[in-house]
Image (cartoon, grey):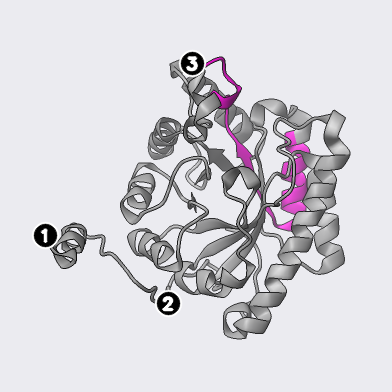
Amino acid sequence: MTLERINGLCAGLGHPVLTDGADSAGRFPDGSRYRVEIPSCEGPDVMAAVLDEADRRGVPVHRVSQGSGVMMLTDAEIERMVALGAEHDVEVNLFLGPRSSWDIGGQSKVSAAVGAAARGNAAVAASLCDAERAVRLGVRSLLIGDLGVLALLGRMKGDGRMPEDLVLKTSVLMPLSNGPTAALYEEVGATSLNISTDLTVAQIAEIRAATTVPIDMYVEVPDDQGGAVRFYDVPEVVRVAAPVYLKLGLRNAPNIYPVGGHIGALAQNLGRERVRRAELVLRLLSELAPELAAVPATVAG
């Protein structure tokens, strides 16, 4: 069997193997190619610190995402984050439910691939309960680590039990490393796709060719997800992946989930450093590809 025959099998099913990436014609509603996401924004105090640092540095922040989960926030904390988001035109994205890595099961202790899965139907139900609570408190963007939970929330949006404009964002803990998987996630309800952290530009372009929804990608990757620092890749990522959220993790940083007041100052300092990292990335993008950075980035959709 030849390489052409092997690659032709995939191309014949609508997913060609690429060796380079074409310019993406996709844009956010405001015409921009990219937006900035600050992850691990663990509650209103961290979010306030992130927004303060962003204002001080002139860094646009369009989305903040939280990893400890809805169940680790009080109603008042969620409402304050929603209010901060409305005040600053920032999308607030909260993680759903319990997860295997916090559970009594053993597999997640030896395989990170199942760490965010909902272990058993009770965990699925808890995730849906988290989603309903977050929506009731004004949240319109949810972070999901389980395919079944994603599919059920997609159905609930379809039948009117969840808001039509609710963002369903996949977690980096849901493996997404090829076009067919991206298409599947979108088919069952995903409206924002966190892709795997170690993909080549051509592989990212394959995913973009398979889906129209925004991609989000770590351009500095937490150590437990690979630890790459890909600042000089950002122009090519923006070129082939638009519309894309540039997502700033941190190397050499502790895993703080679930966060609480006992490490509140640490979480705030990490948030501020992520904004500084975003400043570095945007400077490089502006210098290396000003034609990609020229479109003003505004309100997240």
- For label 1, the residue is 1
The amino acid type found where label 2 is placed reads Asp
Tell which tag, 3 or 1, sits nearer the viewer: 1
Query: Which stretch did the figure color magenta?
Result: 78-105
Question: Can you see residue 45?
Answer: no
Q: Earlier in the sequence, mark 3 or mark 1?
A: 1
Residue depicted at 52% across the width and 53% down the height:
197
- Element carrying mark 3: helix
Residue beneath the point at 65% across and 48% down: 222
Q: Quadrant of the C terminus?
A: bottom right
Residue 294 point in image, percent of width and height: 63, 81
Residue denoted by label 2 = 23
Q: CA distance from mark 3 to mark 1?
A: 47 Å
Q: Nearer the viewer, mark 2 or mark 3?
A: 2
Which is more toward the observer, 52 or 174? 174
Look at the image and tell me in which quarter the N terminus lies: bottom left
Going by the numbered disc 1, the residue's amino acid type is Met
Between 198 and 183, the one nearer to me in the picture: 198
Residue located farthest toward the left when viewing the structure as drawn: 1
Q: Nearer the viewer, residue 174 or 130?
A: 174
- For label 3, the residue is 122
Q: Is residue 65 above or below residue 274?
A: above
